[in-house]
Image (spheres, coloured by chain):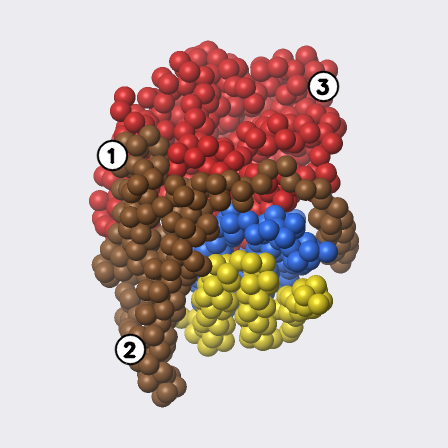
Chain colours: A yellow, B red, C brown, D blue
Amino acid sequence: MSTAFDLLLAAALLWSAWRTLATPQIGRAVILFIVFGLLLTLAWARLDAPDIALAEAAIGAGLTGALLLDAVAALRARRPDDEEGQS
Amino acid sequence: MTPLLDPLAWLILLPLLWATLAFLAADRHGPMLALAGIGGQLLCVIALAGDVASHGSIGHLAGGWAEPLGIRLVADGLSLVMLLLTQGVALTLALYARSYFSQATPPAFWPLTGFLLAGMNALFLSGDLFNLYVTLELVGLAAVGLVAAGGGAAQIAAALRYLLATLVGSGAYLFGVALIYGSYGTVSASLLGSLITSEAPLAVWLAGGLMLTGLLLKTALLPFHFWLPPAHGGAPAPVSALLSALVVKASFYLFLRLWLGPFAALSEALPALAQVPAALGATAILWGSWRAIRADRLKMLVAYSTVAQLGYLFLIFPLLGTGALALQAGILQATAHGLAKAAMFVAAGTLIKVGGSDRVLGVAGAAAHLPVSLFAFALAGVTLMGLPPSGGFLAKWLLIDAALAAGQPWIVVVALSGGLLAGIYVFRVLRLAFRRPTTHDDVPLPQRPAALLEWTAFALAAGSVLIGLGAAPLLALIAGVQP
Amino acid sequence: MKALWRSLTVVALLGLAAALLVAVLGLPPAPVKLAGEVATNLGASGVSHPVTAVLLNFRGYDTFLEVAVLIIALLGMLAAGLPPPPPTGSRNAMLPTLARLAVPLMVLAAVYLLWAGAFRPGGAFQAAAVLAAAAVLLHLAEILAPWPRDRRGPRLAIAGGFLLFLAIAAALLANGGLLRYPPEHAGLLIVLIESGLTVSLAVNLAAFFLLRADKT
Amino acid sequence: MSAGLIYAATGCLLFVLGLGGVLLLKALLRRILAFNLMGSGAFLVLVGLAQRDGTPDPVPQAMVLTGIVVAVAATALALTLARRWHALTGREDIARVGDAGSRARRMANDRRKVGR
């Protein structure tokens, strides 16, 4: 029973990872990456690694995801002239 | 000496300390902190050299826990030579950089340099494969930050390519460590040396392949050299010198250490494997030299010369079975090239800064108004060509000796032709420098640079030659290494 | 040529994947079992949670260097040029209210995680990540303004926690090794280090978002 | 098959997938995502393989915590560089380094785009 769950989770991890790289829109790719991070959190819990699960949720999916979303927004805004040092 | 002043530990703590203080001081007092800090590091290496000379190898258990639970730091002849080279070149480069950046220092230059040195020292001293991964990241990310300094498009592009290469390299290394831990339950290099046998499972062979390939990528051995010329050629001269002279040597050192230590049983079980790095090295010598001959920008010429000179380091692998000769040749080449390449980059930096042009053609007439820098460039060239009595000459001599002993005459041919090719690109610069500038005589002579800019280059170049005369203690240190 | 190179890479990667699967699925048991060693020495580590014991005692040297990696990433950002501050006034009106409600809870959660780390899952990293997330939320709600590059406070917090770690690591050399805690003081020293690290890591992680170019 | 072994095998595939992404994709953000997948794969192998007999091992777990922090640091630096590159050139990808001729052309292009 639990092996079936593990296999299902493994498949979901691989699928979300593949979609992260293959989906055409970068915004969706980042969302899929965050989904991947949350699934990975589950995997860590299954591996008796609650410390990593906490860190993955907070840093891996949370902060990294927020950094990526921030970067996507900045790239979409296309303001090539107001970054530092460009005078 | 009291344990509180343990030089081995302070080689790591001291650069971390001054780098953090430089970060805290937000670009003020950087040169002062760096010079004091690196000076202290040099004293630590000298103290450590005394210990290693009398004991052979010094261990230090971080946390006080023995392996496999804890992390062992080790200093032996091999790490000591690399540490000496690093602190010696870094101190000279810090003097040069203080003068070179007298107008404006790129942001974060000094703290990044400090963290880079801390990472390198930690790498040379670590005996734990996972801890080595952390040191690789310290070195890699600090070096990328230095390449990006200034933030122009060329620097950012070079930094991005370098970052992607270095992250793939350390990613492959980390994956290999994961396989090793799964196979043996430990990441201690010394324990693995006896655990890994020629009957190792497939996972260990794959781990070895991934880790060593990752390190080749970081060392920029052909065909993984693509990121090096833009990164080393595009950075400010002190950064180029730091990267070309020292940083690529760190991943080479780790490659060599893994080859001789944990993975020794694998390379002995399949001797033909050693021909792979050697063949790549030989191609790198020929290709890098050719590109250096064709380069039209001065610093690109020097950067491609690094691609070529790194090739020599990998020629030693099929010869390591013949005794200490090949190892001595490799480490002496790393040392001599480190000094010579630092000299060449800082001399080129001065020529470009004063002459105002980064083309190779821009050096025309430099012999008249920058004689010291040009002499330093030529002296460094003597080492790269391998002319006596330089360190490069002795390294090639030892290499040829080892190649003949091992019955691999093709290595002799490659080593000699590499020297000839180096002669072509060095003389290309020198010939131009003695020519009168093609333009008119009424152009005012460029301002004389600060004396420090010229004499630091000279000191480094002189070091690369003198090391050939005084290599005996160095060679003895390396011969005493028990892999 | 390009298509050939791509297909060669794909074939090589598929081969690597197959070899890795074969290698991993057929791996014999490892000769060394570190979990047992950790359990045996846990009593002398100063904490009762094994992961924290490895992270701050048995392999504390790794953790020490890793904090430097975070500072390096920040320095790299400063070297390359900071991104501009986000445009103001475009945020969701609900965000400030949400932030005011959530942030105290997040701070509480961080304190709990830090305290819990000694004997159950949690510790400085997780606590710092939650604190950093709280700072980012305040930033998105425009309660916390971006930090200009020369702001002293964040630098002091980041360097302070690391320097405390460094000072303890150096002082313990007198005990015979880098970060070699005397077992009777290990618990206290680890709490001290973790508290400093929580602040340092939280500010460092938050700075990835908040450190922005000065508005000119 | 133990849970550890299942996730170790998943980790192998994730690593190769991420590696392929960094090597073959063009857009910088996508390659940064791929690098993170590579890292996650390595972490799963580190813990999963060590725990293939079913007993938890705190040592690789602590190593992964270290690795996660290193990965976020590298990602933050990579994103800053990518944003700066975009701000300077308006481009979201960086030409792969091929033969020498294309490199010279590309650098000339880069310079023209920046207008220096």
Instruction: Give the quadrant of the N terminus of chain B.
Output: top left
User: Closer to the camera, C134 or D19?
Assistant: C134
**How far apart are the two marked residues, 1 and 2, measured between alpha carbons?**
42 Å
Residue in the picture at 73% in, 50% down: C25
Q: Which mark is residue B408?
A: 3
Q: Which residue is mark 1?
A: B36
Q: Choose top left, top right, bottom left or bottom right for residue B315.
A: top right
Q: Choose top left, top right, bottom left or bottom right for residue B456.
A: top left
Q: What SS does tag 2 mark? A: loop
Q: What SS does tag 1 mark? A: helix
User: Is residue C188 shown left or right of residue B255?
Assistant: left
Residue B231 coordinates in the image, percent (x, y): 49, 46
In the depicted structure, whether residue B398 falls above or below residue B259? above
Asked whether the viewer can see residue B458, the reply is no
Q: Which residue is mark 2?
A: C143
Residue A24 coordinates in the image, percent (x, y): 64, 74
User: Closer to the camera, B205 or B324?
Assistant: B205
Which residue occupies the extreme bottom position in the image?
Answer: C93
User: Is residue B283 shown left or right of residue B325?
Assistant: right
The chain containing the residue under callout 3 comes to B
In the depicted structure, whether residue B72 falls above or below residue B175? above
> Do discs 1 and 2 share a chain?
no
Q: Which tag is nearer the camera, tag 1 or tag 2?
A: 2
